[in-house]
Image: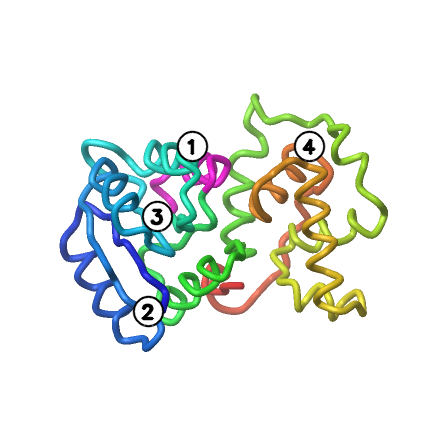
Amino acid sequence: MIRILLVDDQQLIRDAFKLMLNLEPDLTVVGEAGDGKAALALTSALRPDVVLLDIRMPVMDGLETTRRLTAAHTTSAILVLTTFDSDEYVYQALRDGARGFLLKDAPRDQLVHAVRVVAGGESLLAPAITRRLIERFVQHPAFERDQTPELQRLTAREQTVLRLLADGKSNSEIASELVLGETTVKTHVARILGKLGVRDRVQAVIAAYESGFVQLRPRRPVKGRPDQAMH
C-alpha cells in the first residue's frame, strides 16, 4: 500500500485529491496538512511514501518545505503540485530534492500514475512540461553553460543514456531504443547519478541542461495539448 500525505492550503483541493487517490486499491491518504510547517511534522510522524506538496502555501511554502525535507534525509518521495504558469519556483524545487511535478488540473489517471512512479523510486519527467521548465530558465543570466568534469567522466554509452533521460524516456523505453536489458539500463543510470553526484534522474537532467551537454531541440508539431503526456 502506498501511503500519501496531502499538503495544500486549499481544503477543496485536498478533498478532491483524497477522493481520487483513495479510490485506488493500492493508494491511501494517511494525512493532510495546510502548510509546510505542519507537513514537516506529519512527515516525521507518519513516514508517508509520497508527500504531494503544493508550492504556494502560508506559513512555509513548498520550496522551503522541500529543502527541509531533503535536508532531513526523508525517505518520502516529494511530488510537487503546481499551476505551472504562475509558479516560478518549481525548477528550484526539483533541484532541492523533489522527485517530480504535476499540474494541479491533471486528470485522475495522471495523478495516480505520478504517485505510483515516484513511490516506486523513479522520477517523474513529463517531457513537454520539463521542456517548458527548461525553456524558462535556460536563458537566465545565472544559467551555467560550462561542461563540468563530472559530465566529461561519462562513457559514450552513459552519455547516450543521459540524453535519452533528458528526452523523458523511462528505463524500459531506453532499453528498447538501445536494444539493452532493462537491468543494464538501470546500471547505467545508477553510474550516471554516481558520477554526477546527484540524487535522482531529475537532477541528472537538470545538470545536463545547465552544463549545455543537452541542447533544446526545435519543437515538433503535435496534435492536442502537449502537456497532457505523462511518462
Q: Are marks 3 and 1 in contact (CB under 8 Å)?
A: no
Residue placed under numbered mark 1 in the picture:
71
Rounded to the nearest angstrom, the CA distance separating label 3 from label 1 is: 22 Å
Q: Quadrant of residue 209?
A: top right
Q: Is 125 left, or right, of 42 in this rendering?
A: right
Please state the extent of the stretch shown in magenta in the rendering: 82-97
Give residue 215's position: percent from left, percent from top: 70, 42
For label 1, the SS is helix
Q: Quadrant of residue 216?
A: top right
For label 4, the SS is helix
The mark nearer the N terminus, 4 or 2, is 2
In the image, what residue type sits under mark 1?
Ala
Rounded to the nearest angstrom, the CA distance separating label 4 from label 3 is: 26 Å
Q: Quadrant of residue 172?
A: bottom right
Rounded to the nearest angstrom, the CA distance separating label 2 from label 3 is: 21 Å
Mark 1 neighbour density, 10 Å: few (under 14) some (14–19) many (20 or more): few
Mark drawn on residue 211? 4
Q: Is 214 left, or right, of 156 in this rendering?
A: left
The mark nearer the N terminus, 3 or 1, is 1
For label 3, the SS is strand
Residue placed under numbered mark 3 in the picture:
82
Residue placed under numbered mark 2 in the picture:
27
Q: Quadrant of the N terminus?
A: bottom left
Q: Is residue 191 magenta?
A: no
